[in-house]
Amino acid sequence: MEQEAASAVAWALALERSAFAAAIRASIWIYPAANVLHVLGIALLFGSVAVFDLRLLGVNWAGRPAEAALLALPLARTGLAIALPTGFLLFSTEASAYVVNPIFQAKFAAIVIAFLNLALFHAGSYRRIAGWGGEVPASARLAAGISVLAWLAAVVCGRFAAYV
């Protein structure tokens, strides 16, 4: 296990010492722009996911079919497409500190849980969304609960990781 941790730190240190990361740190525009875009991407992603998941949980859009919440998903994809690369840019500047930071590790774990949950949801109950009618199946409600909690944990841990 120690060898794996040392390997992770070595990989992160190599990334952090790369010309790529040095250019980000040296620029007066790249890091702040990446930071702003990352926050906007997360806002789009989490806001859209929350709309969809809360609808499946019955918290909002009462009386509307679950399919109506599908309108939020393209925004979630857009947010993810912005958040992932900008997150990598931010990570690369201090990668060796982040890989050993337990709060950052929790953020990464929450993201992995969110993606695994998404894959299971899409392979299962999502395929039958058109047939749900007015009743959201328990499996979809469970997936929605896990999703909103996992993404919320990722957001909270992401903010905390910068200060721990």
Image (spheres, helix red, strand yellow):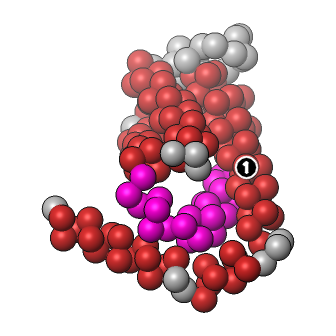
Query: 105 or 141, which lies in front?
Result: 105
Query: 100 or 137, which lies in front?
Result: 100
Q: Is residue 68 above or below residue 157?
A: above
Residue 52 is covered by the magenta coloring? no
Determine the image quadrant of residue 130: top right
Q: Is residue 111 above or below residue 83?
A: above
Say which residue appears at 42% left-offset and 52% top-offset. Answer: 101
Outermost residue toward the front in this view:
164
Q: Is residue 70 above or below residue 132?
A: below
- Main SS, magenta region, reads helix
Say which residue appears at 69% left-offset and 77% top-offset. Answer: 24
Residue 126 can be seen in this image: no
Residue 157 % position (x, y): 52, 40
- The reply, left or right, for residue 92 in relation to residue 10 is right
Residue 80 % position (x, y): 64, 54
Q: Is residue 90 above or below residue 16?
A: above
Which part of the image, by quadrant, shows the N terminus? bottom left
Identify the amino acid type marked 1: Val
Outermost residue toward the top in this view:
63
Query: 38 or 141, which lies in front?
Result: 38
- The reply, left or right, for residue 157 in relation to residue 22 is left
Say which residue appears at 44% left-offset and 30% top-offset. Answer: 146
Say which residue appears at 57% left-offset and 22% top-offset. Answer: 56
Determine the image quadrant of residue 121: top left
Q: How busy is the neighbourhood of tag 1: few (under 14 within 10 Å), some, or many (20 plus)?
A: some
Disc 1, SS = helix
Determine the image quadrant of residue 61: top right
Query: Which residues fall within the magenta stretch?
Result: 77-101
Which residue in the structure is indicated by mark 1? Answer: 39
Residue 42 can be seen in this image: yes
